[in-house]
Amino acid sequence: MDKKIPISKDGKNHEYNIETMLSVGGLQVVLLMNDGEVLENNVVALDEQGNLVWSIESILSFKYPEAYVALSKKDEHTISVISYSGVCFEIDVFEKAVVGKRITK
């Protein structure tokens, strides 16, 4: 996908490349990249007006930032994200909670 999206994070405006965008129950869940570079904490959810609803680090909190390489939709409430280290997390996008976890590598 060759689209860019502006997102305000940490009080600054950033422009990211969209790798994957999914519509999940009225939210747009986006996997961000930067010219092929995998970013840290690179999954966000936006409302219909493009406002940031949540960022992945508010749901999955680790000692060090994690990068995500794949995003897919399970149903109208749940997405799957695969971390760079090979862990697949299933996340309820409305509850902002992990509902499943498995190792992929």
Image (cartoon, rainbow, N blue to C red):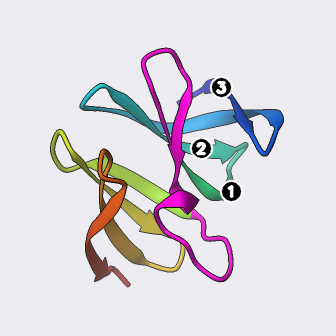
User: Considering only order in the chain, which callout, 3 or 2, is on the residue closer to the N terminus?
Assistant: 3
Q: Position of residue 72 (x, y in %)?
A: 31, 49
Q: Residue 51, relative to residue 72: is it above or below?
A: above
| Real-space Cα separation, disc 1 to disc 2, in angstroms | 7 Å
- Name the residue located 41 percent from the left edge and 66 percent from the top edge: 82
User: Label 2, on which residue?
Assistant: 32
- Name the residue located 17 percent from the left edge and 39 percent from the top edge: 76
- As shown in the figure, which amino acid type bears the numbered disc 3? Lys
Q: Residue 100, relative to residue 76: is it above or below?
A: below
User: Considering only order in the chain, which callout, 2 or 1, is on the residue closer to the N terminus?
Assistant: 2
Q: Secondary structure at mark 3?
A: strand
Q: Is residue 56 magenta?
A: yes
User: Label 3, on which residue?
Assistant: 4
| Real-space Cα separation, disc 2 to disc 3, in angstroms | 9 Å
- As shown in the figure, which amino acid type bears the numbered disc 2? Leu
- As shown in the figure, which amino acid type bears the numbered disc 1? Leu
User: Label 1, on which residue?
Assistant: 39
Report whether 45 appears left or right of 64. left
Residue range of the region highlighted in magenta in the rendering:
44-67
